[in-house]
Amino acid sequence: MKSPSTFLPYFCCLTLLLLLPFCGRAADSDSLQDFCVADFKSSIIVNGFPCKPVSQVTSDDFFFDGFSKPVKPNQFGIAGIAGNVLAFPALNTLGISMNRVEFSPQGLNPPHSHPRAAEVGVVIQGELLVGFLTTSNVFHSKVLKAGHMFVVPPGLIHFQMNVGKGRALAFTAFNSQLPGVAASSSIFNSTPPIPNKVLTKAFHVTDDVINIIKSKSAHP
């Protein structure tokens, strides 16, 4: 007989999906039909994606194997796989999506926010320091272990960092088909760039400091 820990990842993922409807009103509009598999080839512009003709929809449209594919860690030591509408078109109009995030030792998911969704997550393996910052500049954080869950309200800056000895794994879910990511480092590597005179005044530093930060935070 399998031990209870064997079923932990499956239980945690199921919990995420069951709790999604209770994360407040869905960030995306309610669907008015059974499904609306995204049609990326359409030239029609809507708030989301147009629907693929029902006659062209197959069973394969409703299944996603992206979380099973290996991904190399980035410069921060995380390997993230997004299960949003861009990767899984059947999520179109449903107001849900998920991510799989694997952390190398000391790996960091840098401070960022999701402008269109709240986030809930479950730690499957390892130990993660999870924290977020409120609009009142209050910092909330806690070290979580396997089976522990967290929530981040919509639009708030947050992060996760592996503070354990080995790898860590977490699944996160959102009440949006495309929650978006606004990275805090983006102000230093935007296109076109924000003028240095704005950044030097905002952070009370010199041009040299801003240029160093820009060089360190540039996309690889």
Image (spheres, helix red, strand yellow):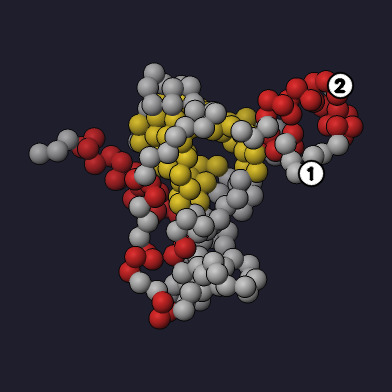
- Relative to 33, does residue 65 appear above or below in the rendering? above
Q: Quadrant of residue 34?
A: bottom left
Lateral position of residue 66 relative to residue 7, left or right = right
Q: Quick check: can you spot residue 192?
A: yes
- Between the C-alphas of marks 2 and 1, the distance is 20 Å
Q: In which quarter of the image is residue 205?
A: top right
Residue 11 drawn at (x, y percent): 30, 45
Disc 2 crowd, CA 10 A, few/some/many (<14, 14-19, 20+): few
- Relative to 14, does residue 60 appear above or below in the rendering? below
User: What type is the residue that disc 1 sits on?
Assistant: Pro
- Residue at image mark 2: 206
Quadrant of the image containing the C terminus: top right
What residue is drawn where x is 59% and y is 32%?
110
Residue 94 drawn at (x, y percent): 48, 64
Q: Nearer the viewer, residue 191 or 88?
A: 191
What residue is drawn where x is 70% and y is 38%?
186
Q: Tag on residue 192?
A: 1
Q: Which of 27 and 25 is in front in this view?
A: 27
Residue 24 drawn at (x, y percent): 54, 56
Residue 74 drawn at (x, y percent): 51, 32
Helix, strand or loop under label 2: loop
Q: Which of 26 and 170 is in front in this view?
A: 170
